[in-house]
Amino acid sequence: MRTIFHVLPITILALVFTVGSSAGCGDDDDGNQNNTNNWEQLSDDFLRTEAGPADYGCMASADPAQTFTQDTEITGIVEDFEEHFPVEGIEVTVYATRADLVADTPFDVSDPSASDGSYAVLVPADTQRVHYKMVDPTSENYFTTMELEDPVAGMGTGAPTTTGKDRAAISLTTVDTVQLTLGMSRIPGRGIIAGTVYDCLREHVSQAGLRVYNGPASDPNRQLISIWSNDNPDRNSFYFRDGMPSRLQSFTELGGQILVANLAASTSVTIEMWGRMDAGQSPSDCTEGCLISSQEVLVMADTVVITDLNPLYSN
């Protein structure tokens, strides 16, 4: 659930891509059938985190993100996505629902961030996750960045917090440089989606495979639009290696990060993550592969959308 990386390390878009042929299991998305389980796209290895086997025992449980009981002010710093320095003059907009985001009906808009990057904005009561948009009103230096499905108050059993809600701002230079290093040019008017895969313990997940469709699973006519074979000039999908997108990475590494570029704007795409778990993991019927995360994301023109790819919560 969510969108530009609030969770992805800021070095992510400082992407330096190594050009070469893909390694690992067959992961060519080209020409695959709609709505079919293409097991050849799955890693031979089981889903893992730095702590050990990935934990998906919470699948079908309620989202553990917390809420505030009343409209609450939160504060944080707007940082440059690549260099981490504070960014002045960025407006942070909060949307309570996806419908509000599509209609551009914000719940609140901050004053421009101060010289130290600080901002303050209200978030709604009784809402687990909200959507943020970071905008440079001058449009001179920074790309519009969105973070979707961000936890409002926190995750798990800790006390909800109102501070340290830091936001990312991505410079125009970074966006263009990243795509050039990937051997592609940014198409004006198109959008970028980035994300991080999480298990039930909020750990980054490796060995997950990416699929992006131009419609939900309920659409029998949806098409697979994630392309990442090296011999395809329209390649648009990448996994990260050592904090950077890499043509050599066939599945998520321990950072759990993915990037899909040059997507048509004003469309809704579905990002799915798939993987395998051994018989001792949960769900135990996933040894041959299963869907572990599904997130519908609105592609915005000239915008980087960052989303958390969370377990399949019931809500």
Image (cartoon, rainbow, N blue to C red):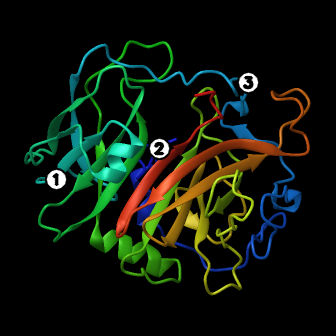
Residue drawn where x is 46% and y is 76% of the image:
179
Residue type beneath disc 1: Ile
Residue 39 image point, x, y percent: 87, 56
Which residue is denoted by mark 3 in the rendering? 57
Q: Nearer the viewer, residue 285 or 43?
A: 285
Residue sitting nearer the eye, 223 or 174: 223
Is any atom of residue 84 visible in this view? Answer: no
Residue 91 in the image, given as x and y percentages of width and height: 16, 50
Number of the front mark, 1 or 2: 2
Q: Which badge, 3 or 1, comes first in the chain's sequence?
A: 3
Residue receiving disc 1: 90
Quadrant occupied by the C terminus: top right
**Image x and y of residue 115, in percent:** 7, 48
Q: Which residue is mark 2?
A: 2
Q: Secondary structure at mark 1?
A: loop
Q: CA distance from mark 3 to mark 1?
A: 39 Å
Label 3 close to label 2 by CB (< 8 Å): no
Q: State the SS at label 2.
A: loop
Give the structural element (helix, strand or loop) at label 3: loop
